[in-house]
Image: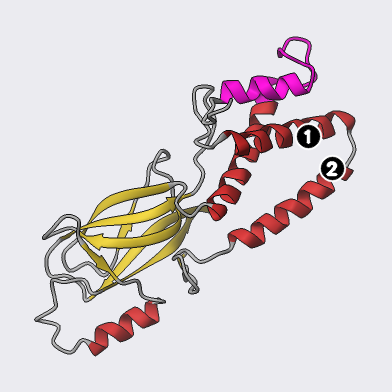
Amino acid sequence: MSAGNSTLADILAEVRDLLNEPTASNSFWADSQLKRYIKNSHRDYWRKWARKKPEFGSRQKDFTYTASAEYVDVSFTDDEGFPATVDYCEDRTDMQPGTKIPWADSMEALTHYYNQLGDTVLLSNWPARIFGTIHQSASSGVQTNVFRTHVAPIPSGSRSMRLHYQAEPYQLTALTHTTGLPDVVEQCIILKAASIARAQEEATDEPFRLLLDEAEKEMISSSRPLRKGPKRVRSTSSW
């Protein structure tokens, strides 16, 4: 796997080789178990690699900011991936590539800037600032997260926008899915998945305590700003 970006089937075969169980027949581990271990390891190392490589996982998402809208929710497919961090947003309505829209530090800063504009008629169709939040809603106990964008001033006409962002890891489930990662990261995924499987076989909790410690450190490292830079995203909720 010198080039990386291997399929789940390839990774599964490598893990089974390390476990001396090349096939699922008469094996302690079912393929479904090992695939879950691989999926979790893939998610963890995708995020680690993304923090080391700011250009990794870079995506673009085009969306329309509706005229007179207080905010617009942007949807992402599984393949596009939800934003982990945002590089910038551009307004492509009048030219391509478009004008880069400065990012506000908070909703309060966005509102304050809007109030400072003064002549809102002159600027009413030109987004001068943008802010994004991970908005949460709940229905019957089911939480839903959406990426919500706000601009100031609110445009009087629809605007064609493009978000540049670094994606969260997608779900590695089908055997034909590829990791999207180089071989140096894939080796970590393989070894971690095999280690979890071996710990499960040996029925000892020591490896899991180490993995819990690693998971908690990863959680802290992942609580970084949505916008790349020193400021934090502020989430909003409706219940």
Residue farthest front in this picture: 2
Residue bounds of the magenta highlight: 8-33
Q: How many marks?
A: 2
Residue lying furthest top: 25
Asked if residue 204 lies left or right of residue 40, the reply is right
Element carrying mark 2 = helix
Amino acid, disc 1: Ser
- Does 29 sit above or below residue 202? above
Q: Which mark is residue 30?
A: none
Identify the residue at horizontal 59%, vertical 25% (top origin).
1
Q: Is residue 140 visible?
A: no
Q: Position of residue 69 (x, y in %)?
A: 22, 67
Camera sees residue 113: yes
User: Are dots 2 and 1 in contact, CB under 8 Å?
Assistant: yes
Relative to residue 65, is residue 47 drawn left or right? right
Please tell me whether residue 138 is drawn above or below residue 80 in the rendered image: below
Q: Is residue 16 magenta?
A: yes
**Callout 1: 10 Å neighbours few (<14), some, many (20+)?**
some
Q: Quadrant of residue 191?
A: top right
Residue 70 position, x and y percent, is 26, 70
From the top left corner, tell me how far across and down residue 238 is, in percent: 44, 66
Q: Earlier in the sequence, mark 2 or mark 1?
A: 1
Left or right of 128 in this view: 125: left
Label at residue 207: 2
Which residue is label 1 attached to?
195
Residue at 67 percent of width and 55 percent of height: 218
The residue closer to the viewer here, 44 or 33, is 44
